[in-house]
C-alpha cells in the first residue's frame, strides 16, 4: 500500500454533498410540491441573500475570524441606497453610496482586527450595533421607499430566464471559489487561518490580507443588501436581523472550519442549499415561525458539533473507510 | 523482571502509509528501553498508541500481563502511563502550576487550594532543578523550559510507565544532564521507561536495551546496550553505514553578506555585532536561553529591534518586517516548528510553496510550476510523505522539519538563518542536511545556524560565535574550537561579575 487512496479521500469531501442529496430525496418524498420546478426556482431565489454573503464569510472564517456585522451592513446599504436615490434621483449614486458604506464598515472591522489585534468576535459585535444604529439614523427609523422603477429591475429582472440576484450569487460562487483555490490571495487566507505566525514568518502579508478580506466581505454584503432593497422596493432599517447566524451556519455546514485554515467553495454552496431546503420545506409544510427558530437553531448546533467531530477525526469518512478496508486486508 | 508494558503484534495504518506493522516488544520495571529508527519509522505512533491517542488496527497492549484497550488518553493515564510528547502539549496562557497539575489540582472543600498547588509545583520544579516561577505563564518561557514543564507533568502524575518522545531535542546540555539523572532515579524506582531520541550519546548513556524500527517494522532488538556499538545501531536503523556524519568540506569565502552592527532588542543584553561572508557557515553555540533565537528573530525582522543595523550585501534592512528580509534574500527556519513553521492542515506542497509564492508576488497560482518544484524538493530532501498533497501535520516530526527547509530552498534564499536545523532529525538525514548546507554554501550562500549540540557546531561550522546571556562571549575559528573552550565561553562565569 504505497499510493494514497484518492477515491476514499474524495468520498470524504463528498460528505456534505451526500447529506444534501439525502435531504433533497427525503424532502422530495415527504413534502408535496418540494421538487416542482416552481418551488425549486423559489428555493434558489430564497437563498440568494445568504448564499452571496456566505462566499465572503467563507474567507473570513477561513482566516480564523468571524463577522457578525453582515446583517447590519445589509440593512445600512439598502437604506442608504434608498435615501440617496430618493434625494438625488440617481440610481448610480445610490448604489455607490451603499457600496461605499459596506466597504467602509468592512475596512473598520478589518483594520481594528488586523492592526489593533482585537478579537473579531468583539469588534464585529460592536460594529453590528453601530451599523444597525446608523441604518436607523439614516432612515429615521422608517422604511424608505425608492422612487425609481429602474432600480427594481435589479431585484426582479432576468437574464436568460434567471433572476439577477441568482446571477449575482452564481458569480460570487465562481469568483470567490476561484479566489480561494487559484490565487495567492486565497491560499494566503488559508495559511493565515491555519497558523498566523508561521504564515507571517513565511512572508505572507498578514495584516493586508486580513483587512482586504473584511473589506471584500463589506462590499459583497452591501451589494447583496442593495439587491435585497431592490427586491422589496424599499430600504428597511430592521431587515436581516440574525442573518449573520444563517450565513455562518451555512458555511460551517459546508465544512468551513471555525478554527480556520479549511474551506471549500463547493462545501459552502452545499451548506447554503441545505439551509435553504430546510427552510423551504418548513414553509411548504406551513410550520409556524416559532418552530422555525427552533429548527434553524438546531441546524446551527448540528453544524458546530459536526465541525467539532470532524476536527477530532471522529467523523471522517476516509478514516472510517480505511479502517474498514484495512481490517479486511489484515484478515486476509 | 516482569514486563510492565508489552506490545503484541501492533499494526497501524494511516491513509497511504503503513505506520506500524506487527511490532512486539516489552519493557520491564526498572528498564530503560530506547526506541530507535529513522524519521517516520513509527516511533511516535507507537507512543501515541500507548497514550490512548491512536487505536491499533491490529494487535494490542498488555499492562502487567493484562490486555488493555485504551479508548482515550484518560484510560491510558488511569493505567499509570505518562507520555512526554515530541510536540509540546501545554496550555500557554495558564500558569506553570496549572500546567503541571492539569486535571489534578489539589482542592480544599471543593475549591482549588492554590497554596498547596504551588507547593506541589515547587517540589516538582526543584526535582527538575529548575528555578521557574510557579505562577509564570507558560507562554513567557523558552521552549527548553516548556519541555521541562512537560516532563514535570509526568512526574506529577507519578506514573509507572513513562515514555519520552525526543525530550532533549530542545533542552540545553545542563537540562539534559538533569533529565538523565531523573530517568536514572525513575529506573531505580522500578518504573518502565521508553525513550525515543536521535542522539546516540544519550541513548547509549541512559538505556539498558533498544528496539529498532524501520518503516514501521520491528527490525532488531538488543537486550543489552553494553554489547552494542553505535555503528551496529546505525546500520540497524538505516540499513547502511555512515562513516563521518559531518564530513566537513572547506570552501573559499566571498565578500561580506551579512553585517550586524550594534544590534539591540529583546533578548539581547548588549549591542551585538558580527559579520558573515558569502559561502560561510557560521555556527551560533550557547546554552538554551543564550539569545540565539532572539538574535535570529531580530535580524529577520520578526521582532523589531531597538537599535543598531543589519546590512545585507551592504544595504540596510530598514523596517521590522519579515517580508523585507525575505525580499533581501533572508530565510528563517524557526526552532519551534509547530507554532512558527508549519501550516498544519495545509498540504506538504503548499507549505513548501508558501514563501516563494509570496516572494514572487504572482497573483495567480501556477499549479504545474509549484507542483514540480515541490515534488523535486520532496525528493531532494527525502521527505517521507504519502504524497505532496498530504497534510503536513500527519508527517513525522523530522519530516516536517525537512519540509520547512525545503520551503526556503524553493525561495532560493541567499542567507539562511537556521535555528536548530537538525532538531528531531535522524542520524542519516542529519548527514544529508549537512551536505545540503555545504552545497548551499558552495553556491555562495551564507548560513547562520544555531545549535545546542556541540559536536554539530564543531563539525559543521567554519566559525563559531558563542553566546552567553544575550551577548557574544567569543568568536572561535574552526581550527581553534575545542569542547573545553566552547563550554568555558558558554557557561556563565561567576568571576566576570554577572549579577
Ligand atoms: N495522523 C496521521 N495521519 C497520517 N499519517 C500519519 C499520522 N501520524 C503519523 N503518520 C505517518 O506514520 C509514519 C510514522 O510516523 P511517526 O510520527 O510515528 O514517525 P517517527 O518514527 O516518530 O519519526 P520522527 O523521528 O521523525 O519523529 C509517518 O510516515 C507518518 O507520516
Ligand atoms: Mg516522532
Image (cartoon, coloured by chain):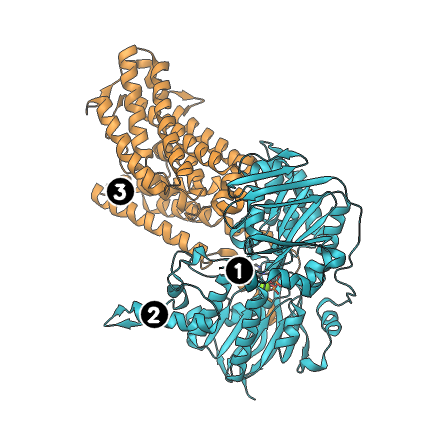
Question: What residue is drawn where x is 55% and y is 76%?
Answer: B181
Q: In the rendered image, what is the letter of the chain coloured orange?
A: A
Instruction: Decide which of A4, B479 is in the foreground and name it.
Output: B479
Q: Who comes first in sequence, dot 2 or dot 1?
A: 2
- Disc 1: host chain: B
Q: Is residue A164 above or below residue B22?
A: above
Residue A287 place in picture, x, y as percent: 23, 43
User: Can residue B441 be seen by looking at this rendering?
Assistant: yes
Q: For the residue labelled by badge 2, is the local secondary structure a helix, a strand or a loop?
A: helix
Marks 3 and 1 on same chain:
no
The crowd level at tag 3 (other Cα within 10 Å; few <14, some 14-19, many 20+) is few
For the C terminus of chain A, the quadrant is: bottom right
The residue tagged 2 is: B117
Question: What residue is drawn where x is 53% and y is 60%?
Answer: B497
Q: For the residue labelled by badge 3, is the local secondary structure a helix, a strand or a loop?
A: loop
Q: Is residue A78 left or right of residue B47?
A: left
Q: In the rendered image, what is the letter of the chain coloured cyan?
A: B
Residue A216 place in picture, x, y as percent: 43, 30
The residue tagged 3 is: A285
Marks 2 and 3 on same chain:
no
User: CA separation, marks 2 and 1?
Assistant: 36 Å
Q: Is residue A187 above or below residue B22?
A: above
The residue tagged 1 is: B497
Instruction: Decide which of B223, B99 is in the foreground and name it.
Output: B99
Question: What residue is drawn where x is 30% and y is 10%?
Answer: A89
Amino acid at each position: 500500500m504505497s499510493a494514497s487512496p484518492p477515491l476514499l479521500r474524495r468520498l470524504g469531501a463528498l460528505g456534505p454533498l451526500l447529506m444534501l442529496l439525502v435531504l433533497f430525496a427525503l424532502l422530495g418524498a415527504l413534502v408535496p410540491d418540494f421538487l416542482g420546478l416552481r418551488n425549486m426556482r423559489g428555493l434558489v431565489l430564497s437563498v440568494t441573500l445568504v448564499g452571496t454573503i456566505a462566499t465572503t464569510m467563507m474567507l473570513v472564517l477561513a482566516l480564523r475570524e468571524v463577522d457578525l456585522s453582515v446583517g447590519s451592513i445589509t440593512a445600512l446599504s439598502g437604506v442608504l441606497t434608498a435615501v440617496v436615490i430618493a434625494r438625488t434621483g440617481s440610481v448610480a449614486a445610490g448604489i455607490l453610496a451603499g457600496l461605499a458604506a459596506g466597504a467602509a464598515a468592512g475596512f473598520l472591522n478589518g483594520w481594528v482586527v488586523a492592526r489593533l489585534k482585537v478579537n473579531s468576535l468583539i469588534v464585529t459585535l460592536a460594529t453590528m450595533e453601530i451599523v444597525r444604529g446608523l441604518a436607523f439614523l439614516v432612515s429615521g427609523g422608517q422604511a424608505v421607499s425608492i422612487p425609481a422603477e429602474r432600480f427594481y429591475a435589479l431585484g426582479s429582472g432576468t437574464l436568460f430566464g434567471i433572476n439577477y440576484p441568482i446571477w449575482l450569487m452564481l458569480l460570487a460562487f465562481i469568483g470567490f471559489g476561484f479566489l480561494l483555490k487559484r490565487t495567492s490571495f486565497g491560499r494566503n487566507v488559508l495559511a493565515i487561518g491555519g497558523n498566523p505566525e508561521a504564515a507571517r514568518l513565511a512572508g505572507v502579508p498578514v495584516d493586508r490580507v486580513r483587512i482586504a478580506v473584511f473589506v471584500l466581505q463589506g462590499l459583497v454584503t452591501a451589494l447583496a443588501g442593495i439587491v435585497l432593497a431592490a427586491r422589496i422596493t424599499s430600504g428597511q432599517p430592521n431587515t436581516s436581523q440574525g442573518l449573520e447566524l444563517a450565513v455562518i451556519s451555512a458555511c460551517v455546514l459546508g465544512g468551513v472550519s471555525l478554527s480556520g485554515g479549511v474551506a471549500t467553495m463547493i462545501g459552502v454552496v452545499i451548506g447554503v442549499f441545505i439551509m435553504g431546503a430546510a427552510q423551504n420545506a418548513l414553509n411548504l409544510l406551513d410550520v409556524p415561525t416559532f418552530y422555525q427558530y427552533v429548527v434553524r437553531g438546531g441546524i446551527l448546533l448540528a453544524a458546530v458539533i459536526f465541525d467539532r467531530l470532524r476536527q477530532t477525526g471522529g467523523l471522517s469518512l476516509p478514516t472510517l473507510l480505511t479502517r474498514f478496508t484495512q481490517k479486511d486486508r489484515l484478515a486476509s | 523482571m516482569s514486563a510492565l508494558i508489552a506490545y503484541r503484534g501492533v499494526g497501524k495504518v494511516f491513509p497511504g502509509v503503513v505506520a506500524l506493522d506487527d511490532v512486539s516488544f516489552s519493557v520491564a520495571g526498572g528498564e530503560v528501553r530506547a526506541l530507535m529508527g529513522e524519521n517516520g519509522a513509527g516511533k511516535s505512533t507507537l507512543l501515541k498508541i500507548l497514550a490512548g491517542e491512536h487505536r491499533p488496527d491490529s494487535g494490542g497492549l498488555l499492562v502487567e500481563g493484562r490486555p488493555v484497550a485504551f479508548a482515550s488518553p484518560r484510560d491510558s493515564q488511569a493505567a499509570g502511563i505518562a507520555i512526554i510528547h515530541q510536540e509540546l502539549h501545554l496550555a500557554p496562557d495558564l500558569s506553570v502550576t496549572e500546567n503541571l497539575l492539569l486535571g489534578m489540582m489539589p482542592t480544599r472543600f471543593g475549591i482549588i487550594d492554590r497554596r498547596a498547588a504551588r507547593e506541589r509545583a515547587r517540589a516538582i520544579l526543584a526535582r527538575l532543578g529548575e528555578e521557574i516561577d510557579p505562577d509564570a505563564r507558560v507562554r513567557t518561557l523558552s521552549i527548553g523550559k516548556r519541555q521541562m514543564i512537560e516532563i514535570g507533568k509526568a512526574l506529577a502524575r507519578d506514573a509507572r510507565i513513562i515514555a519520552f518522545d525526543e525530550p532533549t531535542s530542545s533542552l540545553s546540555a545542563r537540562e539534559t544532564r538533569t533529565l538523565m539523572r531523573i530517568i536514572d532515579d525513575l529506573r531505580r524506582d522500578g518504573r518502565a521507561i521508553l525513550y525515543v531520541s536521535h542522539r546516540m550519546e544519550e541513548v547509549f548513556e541512559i538505556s539498558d536495551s533498544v528496539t529498532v524500527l524501520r518503516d514501521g517494522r520491528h527490525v532488531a532488538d538488543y537486550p543489552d546496550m553494553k554489547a552494542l556499538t553505535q555503528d551496529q545501531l546505525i546500520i540497524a536503523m538505516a540499513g547502511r553505514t555512515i562513516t563521518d556524519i559531518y564530513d566537513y568540506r572547506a570552501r573559499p569565502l566571498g565578500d561580506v553578506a551579512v553585517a550586524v552592527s550594534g544590534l539591540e532588542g529583546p533578548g539581547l543584553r548588549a549591542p551585538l555585532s558580527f559579520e558573515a561572508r558569502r559561502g560561510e557557515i557560521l555556527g551560533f553555540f550557547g546554552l538554551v536561553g543564550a539569545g540565539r533565537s532572539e538574535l535570529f528573530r531580530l535580524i529577520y525582522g520578526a521582532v523589531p529591534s531597538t537599535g543598531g543595523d543589519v546590512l545585507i550585501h551592504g544595504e540596510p534592512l530598514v523596517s521590522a518586517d519579515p517580508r523585507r528580509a525575505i525580499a533581501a534574500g533572508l530565510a528563517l527556519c524557526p526552532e519551534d516548528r509547530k507554532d512558527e513553521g508549519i501550516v498544519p492542515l495545509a498540504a506538504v506542497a503548499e507549505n513548501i510553496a508558501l514563501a516563494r509564492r509570496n516572494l514572487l508576488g504572482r497573483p495567480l497560482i501556477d499549479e504545474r510550476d509549484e507542483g514540480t518544484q515541490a515534488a523535486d524538493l520532496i525528493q531532494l530532501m527525502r521527505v517521507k510523505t504519502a504524497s505532496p498533497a498530504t497534510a503536513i501535520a500527519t508527517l513525522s516530526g523530522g519530516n516536517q522539519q525537512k519540509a520547512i527547509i525545503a520551503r526556503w530552498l524553493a525561495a532560493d534564499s541567499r542567507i539562511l538563518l537556521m535555528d536548530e536545523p537538525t532538531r528531531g532529525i535522524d542520524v542519516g538525514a542529519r548527514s544529508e542536511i549537512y551536505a545540503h548546507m555545504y552545497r548551499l554554501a558552495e553556491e555562495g550562500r551564507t548560513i547562520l545556524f544555531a545549535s545546542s549540540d556541540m559536536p554539530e557546531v564543531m563539525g559543521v561550522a567554519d566559525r563559531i560565535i558563542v553566546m552567553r546571556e544575550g551577548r557574544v562571549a567569543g568568536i572561535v575559528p574552526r581550527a581553534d574550537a575545542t569542547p573545553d573552550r566552547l563550554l568555558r565561553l558558554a557557561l556563565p562565569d561567576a568571576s566576570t561579575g554577572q549579577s
